[in-house]
Image: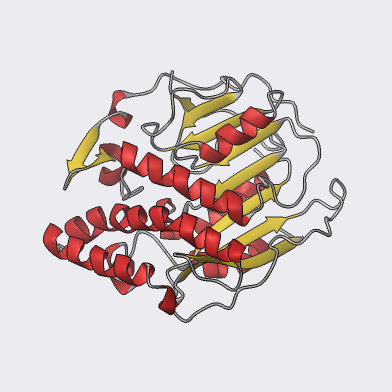
Amino acid sequence: MVILRDPHAGTTTLDNQYRQLTTVHGRDYQKFSLDHSIHFVPVDEEEAERLEAQHRVLNIVFDGRLFFPPVGHIRSVLDCGYGAASWAAEVADKDPECTVIGVDISLHMKPDDLPDNFIPQLDDINRPFTFDANSFDFVHSRMVGGGINKSRWQTYLLDIKKWSNNYSRSIDGVKDPRAPLQLQALLSGAGFTEIETNMIPLPLCAWGDNARQRRIGQANRENIDRLLAAFAIFPFTRRLGMSINAVNELVNRARVDATNANLKPYFPLEHHSDKDLDRITRSEEAHIHGTMKPSRYQSPPHAIIEKQKKAVSDEQVENE
């Protein structure tokens, strides 16, 4: 168990450049993030609602469990790229004695009613962490592939250790949507030794071999409906030069396919965790109950990386 020193130490007042927004085809983006090619997804209320819907879907997928592998008594957590703070706020709310620090390049989607033990700080996870080693019991990173630069993946995993063709073309040279497929090798190269990997087919609509899987797909429809537009508008119009009408037409066709149960569409959701065997007893409980036959209609993979390890401190820029 790690006891954090003052989590506000080393922080400074938020610069106004991080607050500035720019509107692209009716959606609000953080100007700094676009100018520096950090993240091409909106930071408005609609995106915050989508992230909350996505969190509810993943809660169903993981049977309400917030940590993999099973963890004991923790007192310090770091959430990298916390977004709308759905996961981090739930962790903080369930354990008031645990300090949860969340870092993100944008604070625009941060809810006002957060638990007192959740501390939001601003930082670009594409830059080397300034945290001290051995400062957290648990480091969490989920669905951040769209915000990590192509050249950053290996060093990003090292930092944690220390503490659709159009979409591909639109982010070519900056992001790597296929990086999750290589995560096991990257984790191993970063020094992780006890790696457990699961590929979880996450249905985009109500299809599946049993009622539970169909319920997950039904719950995921709202998330996917919003996700397609959120991920497409800026990179397609500004990086590929497509008109907004052409993008909307493409998104609408994708929505039709995503809601066609006959196609059995799904996200291959890859879950990787590294276990500290001296501190954790392996759980015999299966991560996912039941099996699903994947279809051949796949979307680019997303990944969840979780590290049950003492790693990383608190010298980040915080929104005061």
Q: Position of residue 265 (x, y in %)?
A: 44, 72
Numbered disc total: 0
Q: Residue at x 31, y 65 (%)?
A: 255
Taking the image as drawn, is residue 240 in sight?
no
Taking the image as drawn, is residue 56 in sight?
yes
Residue 117 occupies quadrant: top right
Q: Residue at x 43, y 40 (%)?
A: 124
Residue 108 relative to residue 98: left or right? left
Q: Position of residue 195 (x, y in %)?
A: 72, 62
The scheme the figure's colours follow is secondary structure
Q: Position of residue 67 (x, y in %)?
A: 69, 46
* 2 up-or-down from 179: above or below: above
Quarter in which the N terminus is drawn: top right
Residue 29 occupies quadrant: top left
* 212 up-or-down from 166: above or below: above
Quarter in which the C terminus is drawn: top left
Q: Residue at x 64, y 43 (%)?
A: 139
Front in this rendered view, residue 28 or 160: 28
Front in this rendered view, residue 166 or 202: 202
Q: Position of residue 315 (x, y in %)?
A: 55, 28
Q: Residue furthest bottom?
A: 296
Q: Residue furthest front?
A: 211
Residue 128 relative to residue 14: left or right? right
